Amino acid sequence: MAPENQTSVSEFLLLGFSQDSEHQPIIFGLFLSMFVVTVLGNLLIILAISSDSHLHTPMYFFLSNLSFADICFTSTTIPKMLVNIQTQSKSISYAGCITQMYFFMVFGSMDTFLLTAMAYDRFVAICNPLHYSVIMNPHLCGLLVLVSWFISLTYSLIQSLLMLQLSFCTKLVISHFYCELAQALMIACSNTIVNYILLYMVTGLLGFVPFSGILFSYIQIVSSILRIPSANGKYKAFSTCASHLSVVSLFYGTGLGVYLSSDASSWRGMIASVMYTVVTPMLNPFIYSLRNRDIKRALQKVLGRTLYVQ
């Protein structure tokens, strides 16, 4: 690309879902509702776990971290989109775009690692119940979360620093509702080969390695459940991991929809992105509260205490 076609970037334009002004109030109301439900639902899960000493176990420790990551994951994209709709603007500053990319990658990666840690927790609980408290000790749980944070922060920082080295052409339009990394790379003028190599290599690793760990854990879990003689015993064992399995299926199913989409800026690609970035974090609290008696009881106590105070 010729030098005269390059420019000093001050902002990008996010095209979003629709150019029709008639659709904007509907989109605003829909996404505001989903965002509020996501934040409140996950905050209730965190509050229920922290306030009930019976839930101070490895599984709920990971779940509270997952709820926190989901709140942050959704908060990196939706508030800016809502502000843009309300102000009838499509712009996002250069620094804001890079920052949004960074935190989107951080919390997206954290979700992946935390789901893997939760799968390992269920594997130990079902396949090695006698050694569960020894293996899943507070030190290991804390270490797993810290390592997850370290990898997520490091990868996101490297990718963001590489983005800062790129120059952009005069067409600074991102065909998405947030600063999606692959879309931003497409409008860069300078050589993006290193960015793409890192993107596909790390995305593959962050997708394949954790998913392989989850798959291995559940193969072992199913094998152990099938060896349980009674039907009631099988049901109880499976019920302890049914919620996690539902969340994993939803997360990876929608995630694959995003990355296997031939055009992320198409309606199909955007809908897959919404499912991945908004709908999945919104549904997680419902999945865990509806299928888990302990969470139900803790939520009833929290809500009952709140109503009593009022």
Image (tube, rainbow, N blue to C red):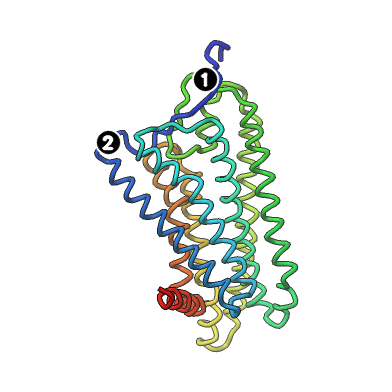
Amino acid on which the number 2 mark rests in the picture = Ser
User: Measured from the top left, where is residue 281 in percent x and y?
Assistant: 47, 57
Q: Is residue 259 above or below residue 57?
A: above
> Residue at image x 62%, y 68%?
61
User: Measured from the top left, where is residue 104 in percent x and y?
Assistant: 55, 45
Number of marks in picture: 2
Q: Is residue 245 above or below residue 296?
A: above
Tag 2's secondary structure? loop
The residue that mark 1 highlights is 169
Query: Looking at the image, which is closer to me, 289 or 130?
Result: 289
User: Measured from the top left, where is residue 291 in percent x and y?
Assistant: 46, 74
Residues at marks 1 and 2, CA–CA distance in whole angstroms: 28 Å
> Residue at image x 62%, y 61%?
116
Q: Is residue 89 above or below residue 46?
A: above
Give the number of the disc on residue 119. none
Query: Looking at the image, which is closer to me, 43 or 200?
Result: 43
User: Measured from the top left, where is residue 21 in percent x and y?
Assistant: 27, 36
* Image quadrant in which you'd find residue 175: top left
Tag 1's secondary structure? strand
Q: Residue furthest front?
A: 310
Quadrant assignment for the N terminus? top right
Q: Are marks 1 and 2 in contact (CB under 8 Å)?
A: no
Compared across the picture, whether 251 is left or right of 205 comes to left
The residue that mark 2 highlights is 21
> Residue at image x 33%, y 51%?
30
Amino acid on which the number 1 mark rests in the picture = Cys
* Image quadrant in which you'd find residue 290: bottom left
